Image (cartoon, rainbow, N blue to C red):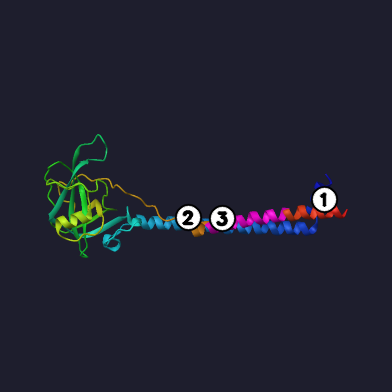
Amino acid sequence: MTRKGNVFTEVRKPTHILALAALIGVCVLFFFLGKWQWDRTQNILNAERAASEQAVPVSEIVGEELNPEDFGRAVTAAGRYVPANQVRVTNRLENGQPSARVGEWVVSEFVVDSGLRIAVLRGWVPTAAEYLTPAEPVVIGGILQPSEAFYEGAVSGQSGVVVIDSEELSEIWGKPLASGFVVLTTQEPQGVANPTPVPPTISTSNVAFPLQNFFYAIQWWIFALFAIVLYFRWIVVSGREDSEVQ
C-alpha cells in the first residue's frame, strides 16, 4: 500500500507533472505524424489504382514480354485488323458458365498505327458461324491478358486453335506478335454483326502496397507507445527509490 501511495505521490510532483504534459504533447505529435503517413499510404494506393485503371495506348506497355503488373490493364489502340489472319478458338462457352452454349472465340491480328502487331479476341460466335473481319481503320479498347497457358502441348486442328498463345499465333500468321492479347471491349466504328463480347479472364486494378509509408505510420505509433511505457516505468522506479530512502 505504501508503494502504491509513493507512486501516486510521484505522479503529483511538479517535475513529473511537467513530464506528463510533455508526454501528452509527444504522443499527440507522434499520433498525427503516424496518421499523416497512413493517409499518404492511402493516397498513393488510390493514385496508383486510378492510374492502373486509366486506359493507355497498348504500344506503350507491350513488347516482346508482358510484365505481370500489366495483366488486366485497360488499353486502347488505333489501327486495323488483318482480315486474312483470323483464327477460331474451339470449344469455348458463350459467357463462361457451364450451362452456356458451346461455340468459338474469334481472334484476329491487329496492326497498331505504331507498327505493333497483337492478337485481339473479338468475341464469341456459334460454331462455324461466319463473321467478317472489318478491313477499315478502327479504334479499339480492351483488357490486356497474358497468353493462355493451360492445355500446354495440345495440338491445334484444322478447325481452329486450342488456346490463345501469341507465340503459336506468330507462327500461324507468319508475323512476330507482341506478348499476350487484348480482349475487345469497345470498337469504333462498331460495324455490323459483331461477335458476342467475352468477359476478360484477368481483370484487376491491384497495385503494389506502399510498404515504406505504411511502416513509417506504424513506427510513429510505436514511438508513442514506447514513450508512454518509459514514462510509467520512470514513475514506478522513482516511487521505489523514495520508498527505500524512507
Name the N-terminal-most of marks 3 and 1.
Answer: 1
**Residue receiving disc 2:** 42
**Kind of residue at badge 3:** Ile
The one of 42 and 232 positioned closer to us in this rendering: 232
Residue drawn at point x = 16 percent, y = 60 percent:
175
**Kind of residue at badge 2:** Gln
Mark 1 Cα shell of 10 Å, populated few (<14), some (14-19), many (≥20): some
In the image: residue 227, left or right of residue 4: left
Report how far apart the C-alphas of labels 2 and 3 lie in the structure.
Answer: 14 Å
**Kind of residue at badge 1:** Asn
**Residue receiving disc 1:** 6
Q: Quadrant of the N terminus?
A: top right
Residue drawn at point x = 80 percent, y = 47 percent:
4
Mark 2 Cα shell of 10 Å, populated few (<14), some (14-19), many (≥20): some
What kind of secondary structure does the magenta stretch mostly adopt?
Answer: helix
Name the N-terminal-most of marks 2 and 1.
Answer: 1
The one of 26 and 116 positioned closer to us in this rendering: 116
Give residue 39's position: percent from left, percent from top.
51, 56
Residue drawn at point x = 58 percent, y = 57 percent:
219
Asked whether 12 falls inside the magenta stretch, the response is no
Give residue 170's position: percent from left, percent from top.
18, 57
Q: Nearer the viewer, mark 2 or mark 3?
A: 3
Magenta stretch in the rendered image: 215-232
Report how far apart the C-alphas of labels 2 and 1 lie in the structure.
Answer: 46 Å
Residue furthest to the front: 153
Give residue 93's position: percent from left, percent from top.
22, 40
Tag shown at residue 218: 3
The relative height of residue 127 versus residue 14 in the rendered view (above or below) is above
